[in-house]
Amino acid sequence: MAAVTLTTIRSLVRGYLDESSAADWTNAELNILINQRYHRVYSAVVTVFEDYNITTNLVNTVANTQEYDTSSADPIPSDIFKIRRVEINYDVSNANSVMQRATPITNIDAIRVRLGESNLGTNIFRNPAYYYLGGKLGFLPIPDKTGTDAIKLWYVKTASDLSADASTIDIPYPERYWNIIAEGATGDALRFGQQDSPEADKFEQKFIAGVILMQEELEDRVAEETKSVTDVSGENLDFGAPGY
C-alpha cells in the first residue's frame, strides 16, 4: 500500500459518511476531526511503546544556570512528549570528564536540601538529578561551567498535525492501523448536530476497540527472548547481605 496520507484518510471518512464530495462536511472540518483522532492514536502508541519515535538532542550548559527551556540561548526541544533519558557532562573541557546519566526527580519534595543546590559534593543521589517542570529542564547540582553539547536528551517527540493533503501519519505499521483514525473521525462527524448519534456511537466503539487491539499488538513489538526485569536503582538487592 502507498503511504497513508491525509487525503487517504479523508477519502475513507467520506466513504463512511456516504459523501464522496463536500456537502455537509468541508475538507477543513474533516481535517480537524482527523487530526484530533490522529493525535489520540499516536499517544496510544507511545503509551505502550515508549521508545517509538525516540530522538536525541544536544544542549549547551551555561555556567551557574540551573534551568533550560525553549526560550534559552540554546533551547531544549519544543516537541518533547516523554523524556526517556538525560545525560550531562559537568566539565566538557576536561578530556577525562564524561557524560553521566541524570536520574529523574518526579516529586521535588524528594529533594531534602535546597532545590538550587550548586555543591557537586552534596549527596542528593549517586548520579546528578534532573526535573522537568513547567516546560523547564533543571539540574541538580547546578552546572558551574559553560559546556558545548553538555546535555544529551533522549525523548519521544509529539506528533505534528497533518496539515497538507500529502502529509503522512507517523505510527508504526501505518497500513495496519490507519483505519482507526478514520473510524474515530467519522464518529465525530456524525455527532455534529446529532445527525446520526447511534451510528456515531458504533464508530466510537470501533475506534476504542481498534486502539486496544493496536496497543496489544505493539506492546511486544520486540519479541526476541523472554521479558525480564531491569534493576534501574542499582541497589544491592541481596537481602542476605550484611546490613539487611
Image (spheres, rainbow, N blue to C red):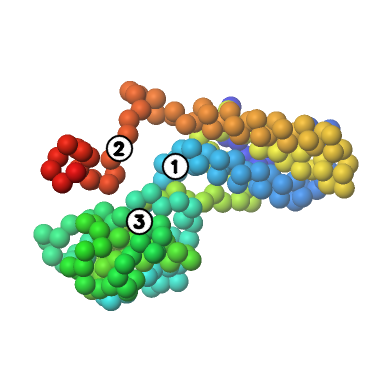
Q: Quadrant of the C terminus?
A: top left
The extreme bottom residue here reads 64
Q: How many marks?
A: 3
The one of 98 and 201 positioned closer to us in this rendering: 201
Q: Are marks 1 and 3 in contact (CB under 8 Å)?
A: no
Q: Earlier in the sequence, mark 2 or mark 3?
A: 3
Residue for point 75% across, 33% down: 203
Q: Quadrant of residue 40?
A: top right
Q: Earlier in the sequence, mark 2 or mark 1?
A: 1
Does residue 12 appear left or right of residue 114 in this picture?
right
How far apart marks 2 and 1 lie (CA) works out to 16 Å
The one of 47 and 125 positioned closer to us in this rendering: 125
Q: Residues within 10 Å of mark 2 (few under 14, many from 20)?
A: few
Image spot of residue 219 (x, y percent) = 47, 31
Can residue 200 be seen by looking at this rendering?
yes
Where is 123 relative to 14, above or below? Answer: below
Can residue 60 be seen by looking at this rendering?
no
Does residue 205 appear left or right of residue 48 in this picture?
right
Instruction: Name the element at disc 1.
Output: loop
Image spot of residue 117 (x, y percent) = 28, 72
How far apart marks 1 and 3 lie (CA) works out to 16 Å
Q: Which mark is residue 50?
A: 1
Residue for point 14% across, 40% down: 241
Image spot of residue 240 (x, y percent) = 17, 36
Please name which of the two marks, 1 or 3, marks the residue nearer to the observer.
3
Q: Quadrant of the N terminus?
A: top right
